Amino acid sequence: MNVQALEALLAAGKDSALLRFGLGKGWLDAGDALRAAMHLGRCVALDPQYSAAWKLLGKAWLAGGQPGAAREAWQRGLCVSGSKGDQQAQREMQVFLRRLDRADGAAQAQAG
């Protein structure tokens, strides 16, 4: 289903975590990271236990130039995935956080 069809469902009052996840993924794939982050943020507000949404929210924030917000989303996602036993999402978010740490370290080394 395309993003416009999902937006139409939302406009018709069919809000849900799954719909917001689909919208977030669709907008991220379309290159609109901030719109994706808005929908994914609503998704995790509707379902705070949605590990995949936390993971994608972090990606959206990073793509939108907000590494601090990305880190926060992935850290919260790690807590969720750990409590749910969602090992795949947990491993992926750990990798994303390590990459962010390396990028931060490289930036600090250049600045220093």
Image (cartoon, rainbow, N blue to C red):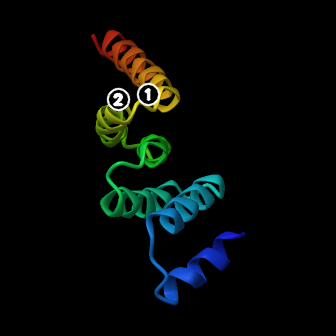
Q: Residue at x 65, y 53 (%)?
A: 29
Residue holding disc 2: 82
Q: Position of residue 5 (x, y in %)?
A: 66, 78
Q: Are marks 2 and 1 in contact (CB under 8 Å)?
A: yes
Q: Where does the image place residue 16, in percent across and percent down from the top left?
A: 45, 71
Q: Quadrant of the N terminus?
A: bottom right
Question: Which residue lies at the image location 57% right of the left edge and 78% below the top edge?
Answer: 7
Q: Is residue 100 above or below residue 68?
A: above
The percent position of residue 74, horizontal first and vertical second, equals 36, 35
What kind of element bears circle 1? helix
Closer to the camera in the image, 33 or 26: 26
Number of residues whose C-alpha sits closer than 10 Å to that of mark 1, classed few (under 14), some (14–19) or many (20 or more): many
> On the image, which quarter does residue 69 sit in?
top left
Image quadrant for the C terminus? top left
Q: Which mark is residue 90?
A: 1
Disc ID at residue 37: none
Distance between the Cα atoms at labels 2 and 1?
A: 7 Å
Residue drawn at 51 percent across, 59 percent down: 21
Position of 110 relative to 56 (above/below): above
In the rendered image, the residue lying farthest to the right is: 1
Query: Label 1 sits on what residue type?
Result: Gln
Residue occupying the far bottom of the picture: 12
- For label 2, the SS is helix
Residue 16 or residue 36, whichever sits in front = 16
Q: Is residue 81 found left or right of 28 in the rendered image?
A: left
Q: Label 2: how many residues lie within 10 Å, few (<14), some (14-19) or many (20+)?
A: some
Q: In this image, 45 relative to 9: left or right?
A: left
- The residue depicted at 59 percent of the width and 84 percent of the height is 8
